[in-house]
Amino acid sequence: MAEDFSAGLEAARLLIATVAKRYPDLEIIPNERTAGELDWNIPVQPGLTTEIWLSFSNDDEMHFSVDEFHVSFFPITHPGPGENFVDAVSGFIDGTYQIVEHYRGSRCVRADLQKPIGDAWEIIASWSRLHWPFPYRKTYKTVKNG
């Protein structure tokens, strides 16, 4: 188990280093929550219109959160999920990707990370919570950097 934790922690640090290298002007603030669980805040600053929260937990998971949107990538010790994490974070920071939040009344019930495909948008990651579809009208909020 210690080897898995060590490999995941190293992979997490490499992924954050990759993001930091792509965006050297952005301040990324590390915070060690507990042994083996780390998070990084990227506060609103020039080049970023909304706060981003990134975290490592459960020995092999990276999390990406913006406003109501939250998604996990695992196992980050394998190439695909780690690359997808960096792509999602980078796409949002670049302003290429957007998040569409779905509300029932004042409660967010779903949020989708989308990337452009021609003139349309493709959902590449989603977050949702259990909800009843009535009696509230559904509204949407788009969150995009830039």
Image: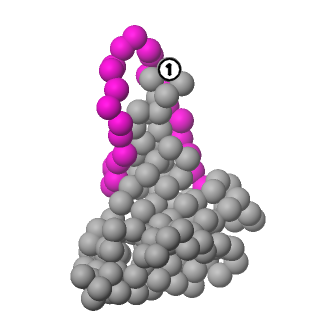
Q: Compared to 56, does 52 lie above or below?
A: above
Question: Going by the image, does 124 lie left or right of 54?
Answer: left
Residue visible at 69% across and 73% down in the picture: 27
Question: Going by the image, does 4 lie left or right of 96?
Answer: left
Residue visible at 65% across and 81% down in the picture: 24
Question: Going by the image, does 107 lie left or right of 82?
Answer: right
If the image is split into quadrants, where does the C terminus sit? bottom right
Label 1 amino acid?
Answer: Gly
Q: Residues within 10 Å of mark 1 (few under 14, many from 20)?
A: few
Observer-nearest of 49 and 65:
65
Q: Compared to 99, does 107 lie above or below?
A: above
Residue visible at 58% across and 80% down in the picture: 20
Question: Going by the image, does 47 lie left or right of 1?
Answer: right
User: Residue 97: x and y, percent?
Assistant: 48, 56
Confirm whether residue 22 shows in the render.
no
Residue visible at 65% across and 72% down in the picture: 29
Observer-nearest of 13 and 19:
13
The span picked out in magenta is 119-146
User: Residue 137: x and y, percent?
Assistant: 45, 16
Instruction: From the image, tell me which residue sits under label 1.
Output: 105
Q: Compared to 30, does 130 lie above or below?
A: above
Q: How many marks?
A: 1
**Residue 41 among those drawn in magenta:** no
**Residue 129 among those drawn in magenta:** yes
Observer-nearest of 26 and 97:
26
Per the image, label 1 sits on a secondary structure element best described as loop
If the image is split into quadrants, where does the N terminus sit? bottom left
- Which picture quadrant has residue 106? top right
Confirm whether residue 37 shows in the render.
yes
